Each structure stands twice: as structure tokens, then as C-alpha cells.
Image (cartoon, grey):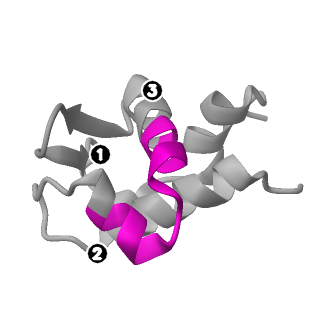
Amino acid sequence: MRLSSTDIYACQALGYLGIQPSGRWTGSEEISDATGVARPYLVRVLAMLSAVGIVSSKKASAGVTPSLGSLKRLRYATFCAPLTGRSRR
């Protein structure tokens, strides 16, 4: 299976969020700086992750935090299928 740019950016964002202290709100600018993903595109990726419940978001400077108890159990199909329209097989 080939990963799209959106898939890769989502993985990078979730990877960065996964190394943050539990419950810490992280701004999109910080994630963009750390991952090298352009902030305007990253904001769209984070909005998609929020829409499917993988991250929680707050407007303004609060940022995002993982919604799941542990990112370690997150599987590719859990977040990439909703982002790219692929079915979870």
C-alpha cells in the first residue's frame, strides 16, 4: 500500500504528539516546526484527525492533544482510512 502525503503528515503529527507529556495541548505551529510540515496543510490534517476523534482540538493557542488513551495502539487504518476515504479492510 502506498502512503499519500496526507497519510505521512498525519503520521508525523501523531508521532510528535505521542512524545509529548500526556494531556499536554500542543499548538500547530510547534508541530509544524518540529515535523517540517507546512502549517497551513498541517492545520487541515489536524482538523481531519479531530473530525474522526483521534485528537481533540481547541481554537486559538491551546492546540491539539491525543484523544486516545495511548497512541501506541493506534493502527494505520484507524486514522488513514477516514483521511483518504479508503475502507478499513
Q: Main secondary structure of the magenta part?
A: helix
Find disc 1 in the rendering and name its residue.
68
Does residue 10 lie above or below 22 as drawn?
A: above
- Label 3, label 1: how far apart the Cα atoms are: 11 Å
The residue depicted at 13 percent of the width and 62 percent of the height is 22
Residue 2: x %, y % from top left: 88, 56
Q: Amino acid at mark 1?
A: Leu
The residue depicted at 63 percent of the width and 52 percent of the height is 76
Tell me the element at label 1: loop
Residue 34: x %, y % from top left: 38, 75
Magenta highlight on residue 43: yes
Tell me the element at label 3: loop
Find disc 3 in the rendering and name its residue.
52
* Rendered-image quadrant of the C terminus: top right
Q: Residues within 10 Å of mark 2 (few under 14, many from 20)?
A: few
The residue depicted at 11 percent of the width and 59 percent of the height is 24
61 sits left or right of 66 in the view: left
Kindly check if marks 3 and 2 are in contact, taking CB atoms under 8 A apart as contact: no
Does residue 58 lie above or below 22 as drawn?
A: above
For residue 47, what is the image quadrant? top left
Q: Amino acid at mark 3?
A: Val
Q: Residues within 10 Å of mark 3 (few under 14, many from 20)?
A: few
Compare marks 3 and 1 and give the one earlier in the sequence.
Answer: 3
Residue in front for this viewpoint, 29 or 48: 29
Q: Amino acid at mark 2?
A: Ile
Find disc 2 in the rendering and name its residue.
19
Does residue 28 lie above or below 84 as drawn?
A: below
Compare marks 3 and 2 and give the one earlier in the sequence.
Answer: 2
- Label 3, label 2: how far apart the Cα atoms are: 21 Å
Residue 7: x %, y % from top left: 66, 51
Residue in front for this viewpoint, 74 or 24: 24
Q: Which residues are magenta?
A: 30-45
